[in-house]
Amino acid sequence: MRTQVAIVGAGPAGLLLGALLHRHGVDNVIVEQRSPDYVLGRIRAGVLEQVTVGLLEEAGVAARLHAEGLPHSGFDMCFAGQRQRIDLQRLVGKHVTVYGQTEVTRDLMDHRTAIGRQTVYDAQDVAVHGFDSAHPSVTWREGGVAHELQADFIVGCDGFHGVCRASVPAGAIQTFEKVYPFGWLGVLADVPPVAHELIYGNTERGFMLASMRSATRSRYYVQCSLDDKVENWSDDAFWDEFRRRLPADDAARLVTGPSIEKSIAPLRSFVAEPMRFGRLFLAGDAAHIVPPTGAKGLNLAAGDVGLLSRALAEFYASSGPARSAGIDSYSQRALARVWKAERFSWWFTSLMHQFPENGAFGARMQLAELDYLFTSDAAQRVVAENYVGLPLAA
Ligand code: FAS
Ligand code: PHB
C-alpha cells in the first residue's frame, strides 16, 4: 500500500487531520489499533474553542455541532462561599461551544466513511520505520497477516501512550513533565445539568466541576486522591460528595441518577520537543498533555493538525525549496501555542485544587489570587482570553 500521508491513530487529532488533508486533496490513510466502538467509548473533552469549531467547519464536519452544540458565553468560579461569572463575551467578545469529544469523533468517523478515505482499525503491533529517510513506512498485523503502508510522511496522532513518540531516538527528543498529586473522578449521567453554564469550584473538600453534554446529560468531576479507585465510589457516594462541593443553591437543585460512565483520570502536564523528526510529525496528545482544568487537550490537538494540514497542503501544492517552509516551521509554531496552553492549564489547576502539601501559606496564596481575580476586570480578561483559546499562528 502507498499514500502521501500515513496517520497513526484515529482519535480526534488523526481523524481531523485526515479530513483537512482530504479537503486539500492530499491522500491519507489512518492506522488505528482499536475498534471504532472502543474509540467512541472513551468519555473525554466537552468544551470546544472557536478555533476548533472553525477547523471542523473547514473540514466540512460542523453541521451537527452547529445544530446540537451549546454556545456558552461564560462560566462560574466559586470559592469560600463566593461566586464570580467570567463573562467571556463581554471580556473578549468570544464564546466556547459545549459539544462532547465523543460527538466530534463520531462526526469525523461518519465524514471519513462518506468521503471514502481508508481507516485500518484493530491494527496490531503497529510500528513506524524509516522516518529519517525519504521513504518512511508504517507496518502492522491484522488477522495474522503483515501489512506495510509506504508514505511521504507519517503523523503520530497516537496519543500519550502511542508508538510514534516512543520510536524517536532518546537523544533526539526532550520531554518536560509535571504529575499532579491528585486525579479527577468523573461521572456521566442522563440528568439535567445543575446550572446552564459550567461551574468550577475550589472547596475545602477539593475541586469540583459541573459540566454537561446537553440539556439532558451532565458531566461532573471531583478531585480525588491518586490512590483512589473508581470501584470505591458507588453512585450514591459520588452524588453525596458532589452535592457537598456544590454551592448551596445549586446543591438544592441537583438532580441525581445512575451513572452511565464513571472513571478516574490522573492529571499531568507534559510536552515533547520538537514535534518533528525528519518525515515523522507528532500532533495532539502524542506530543503534549494538559490537566483538563482549562479544557485545552482536545483544542490543542485540533490546533496542531490545523497548522500541520496547511503545511502539508502547501508542500504538495508548490514546488522548489519554498514548498517545505510550512513543515519546517510546524514544530516551532505548534509549540508556541502549546506552551501557552500548558501555562494556563497549570495555572488554573494550581488555583482551583486543594494542595495540602503547600501548607497554610499556599492556601492563602490561592485565596488572595481568587480574591484578586473576583475583583479585577483585567485579571478576568486574562482568564477569558486563555479559556476561549489563543489564535492559531498564521
Ligand atoms: P487520543 O488519545 O484521543 O487518540 C489517540 C488514538 O491513537 C487512540 O484512538 C488510540 O487507540 C490510538 N493509538 C494509540 N497507540 C496506537 C498505536 N500504537 N497504533 C495505532 N493507534 C494507536 N481534554 C479536554 O479538553 N477536556 C477534558 O475534559 C478532557 N478529559 C480527559 C480525560 C481523560 C481520561 C483523558 C485520557 C484525556 C482527557 N482530555 C480532555 C484530553 C483528551 O480529550 C485529548 O486531548 C484528546 O483525546 C487528544 O486527542 P488525540 O491527540 O487524538 O489523542
Ligand atoms: C467536560 O465537560 O468534560 C469538561 C469541561 C471543562 C473542563 C474539563 C472537562 O475544563
Image: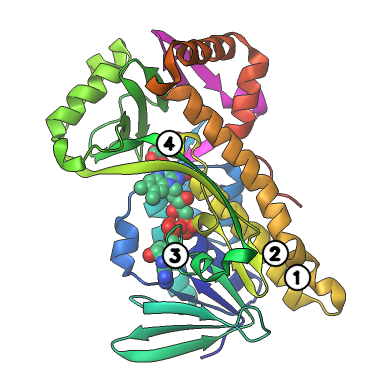
Q: Tell me which residue sits at (66%, 46%) in the image.
A: 337
Residue for badge 3:
162
Residue for badge 2:
310
Q: Which label is found at residue 314? A: 1
| Residue labelled 2 has its Cβ within 8 Å of some atom of ligand 1 | no
| Residue labelled 4 has its Cβ within 8 Å of some atom of ligand 1 | no
| Pointer 4 local density, CA inside 10 Å: few below 14, some 14–19, many at least 20 | some
Q: Which label is found at residue 180? A: 4
Displayed quadrant of residue 343: top right
Specify whether residue 94 is in view: no
| Pointer 2 local density, CA inside 10 Å: few below 14, some 14–19, many at least 20 | some
The Cα–Cα distance between marks 3 and 2, rounded to whole angstroms, is: 24 Å
| Pointer 3 local density, CA inside 10 Å: few below 14, some 14–19, many at least 20 | some
As for residue 76 lying within the magenta part, the answer is yes
What's the residue type where badge 4 is placed?
Answer: Tyr
Q: Is residue 20 left or right of residue 220?
A: right
Secondary-structure class at tag 1 = helix
Task: State the image coordinates of residue 25 (x, y, percent, origin top left).
Answer: 64, 76
**Mark 3 or 4, which is nearer the eye?**
4
Tell whether label 1 touches label 2 (CB within 8 Å): yes
Figure check: 214 above or below 135 = above
The Cα–Cα distance between marks 1 and 3, rounded to whole angstroms, is: 27 Å
What's the residue type where badge 3 is placed?
Answer: Gly
Which span is picked out in magenta? Answer: 75-97
Task: State the image coordinates of residue 195 (x, y, percent, origin top left).
Answer: 35, 24
Tell whether label 4 touches label 3 (CB within 8 Å): no
The Cα–Cα distance between marks 2 and 4, rounded to whole angstroms, is: 35 Å
